[in-house]
Image: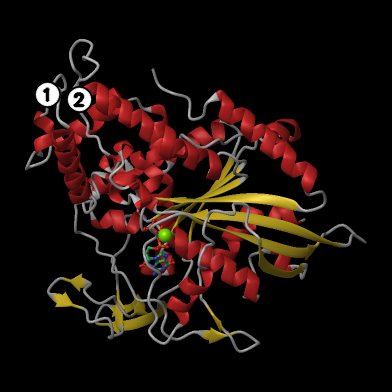
Amino acid sequence: MPDAPLRLIDEIGLVARTLAERAVRPGRRRLRLGVTGLARSGKTLFITALVDALTRGTRLPGFAPMAEGRMIGASLIEQPHAAVPRFAVETHRNALIGPDPHWPQSTRGLSELSLLIRYRSKSFGTPQRELEIDIVDYPGEWLLDLGLLTLDFASWSDRLRAIATADPNPPGFLSADPQAVLSVEATEALARDFTAWLKTKKADPTALLALTPGRFLLPGELEGSPALTFAPLPAPGHIAPRDSVHALFAARYEAYKRLVVRPFFRDHFARLDRQIVLADPLSALNGGAAALSALSTALTDTLTAFRAGDSNPITRLVARRIDRILFAASKADHIHSTSHDRLEALLNTLVADATRRARFSGAATRSLALASVRATREAVVDTAEGPHDVIVGVPEQGERMGAVLYDGKTEIALFPGDLPETTETLSAAPAGRLHFLNFRPPLRLERRADGTPALPYIRLDRALDWLIGDWMK
Ligand SMILES: Nc1nc2c(ncn2[C@@H]2O[C@H](COP(=O)(O)OP(=O)(O)OP(=O)(O)O)[C@@H](O)[C@H]2O)c(=O)[nH]1
Ligand SMILES: [Mg+2]
């Protein structure tokens, strides 16, 4: 029997907390922005760029409150959870603008941040108003776990075993006997074998759905606990004895959901108002059609857990729902702006099912190609066939194009290849036909009026406008 994402007791708790917050903070509105995306999709950079732009007054012409001169300022304020580390925005920003610009590290744990925006309302004579925005950041590896909320041990095992069986070197855990009664050491060996196999799948863009449970890849303080010590098993045929490995692992799988996944979802995702779903279709495209389709399935699977829907004032009072979702293709600076429409079309195909579902439940959706931090600029190169639109930037050290290996210092002009014009040609995309390079962060930054460096972006202003602009009318 599939589970509901949350138990009744959690639901009641959410209603109570929503009502309590309303009572405590009259006047100030609070918007929970969910930044969603798989590993390396660009969550940390999006949050860093958003906070940097709003707190330091970057020019954001596509963000109506700023374009209309109503934005007064923004600053960090006390976050909601006292036990969660604060999002290290200064560290991430310093990585980008320091003497040796580099991207922030991949996220290894949960962090959060609250931003208070002061603005003037459009209505005549109103005093200044305040909008609080709460955001959490987390490792993308944990996101796929949300799909487990509606999956029992047998279905999860079937899914994982199907992927493992297709492996050219089938892992040892596939031959485990579900009826066996195993020693503690033997169950640990099985789990170790499974975890080792999971780690090999991290590099395989066609096996995204295999990457659960997420904490097996990034365990944090739960490393070695029973809730993180199990492996997928075949169905036992008839009812497994109580001391069989199947009964043990099924119980641990449920414990993992109860102790790890459900609290993560309940505390950080169940009460979102707005959501941005970041995806990196270009990296997937490097892996061909199979990788694209894996990304699409993984996104659809994960987004099912979120509560999207019509937010009429009455339902909103008792249970928040996401009423707007922005699907964003990150890293749009990896291609020339003449291809941005095609990148958005590609994104639309990837999230078609998720979009349909969100719209059906009453949420509005939009898609956008953006770059939180623009690492390249555009130029025209004259060639024998005429002028060519190119992007110019410094590829990361170790990036490769054919036989050329980049050293992380040399600036190059690159024609990354045209994105396929139609989605049909896309689905036939062979692996390796297109190749998108990763670039270093921008090495030269423009200065704001106050002399501080401003991070360049593509359409971050429009993303912000769609996500929060209407709350600042
Ligand atoms: N050029 C460019 N690269 C980007 C941009 N956003 C992200 N990237 C690249 O993508 C990588 C991952 O971005 P992050 O923001 O760390 O991704 P994440 O979703 O937080 O990843 P996890 O923490 O691993 O879940 C970065 O190290 C950059 O190489 C962007 O706007 N432009
Ligand atoms: Mg991150």
Q: CA distance from mark 2 to mark 1?
A: 8 Å
Quadrant housing residue 79: bottom right
- What numbered label is drawn on residue 245? 2
Is 73 left or right of 47, judged from the image as shown?
A: right
Task: Write down which quadrant ligand 2 falls in.
Answer: bottom left
Compared to residue 228, the image places residue 421 above or below, namely below
Q: Is residue 317 left or right of residue 228?
A: right
Residue 53 visible within the image: yes
Image quadrant in which the C terminus is located: bottom right
Label 2 sits on what residue type?
Val
Q: Residue at x 82, y 48 (%)?
A: 26
Q: Residue furthest bottom?
A: 451
Which of the 4 quarters of the picture holds residue 240?
top left
Q: Is residue 275 left or right of residue 336?
A: right
Q: Residue furthest top?
A: 238
Circles 2 and 1: CB atoms closer than 8 Å = yes
Q: Nearer the viewer, residue 458 or 181?
A: 181
Q: Is residue 240 above or below residue 451?
A: above
At numbered mark 2, what does the secondary structure look like: helix, strand or loop?
helix
Q: Nearer the viewer, residue 15 or 244?
A: 244
What crowding class fits label 2: few (fewer than 14 Cα within 10 Å), some (14-19), or many (20 or more)? many
Residue 300 visible in image: no
- Element type where label 1 sits in the image: loop
Q: Residue at x 26, y 28 (%)?
A: 249
Q: How many marks?
A: 2
Residue 124, how many percent across, how many down?
Answer: 91, 60
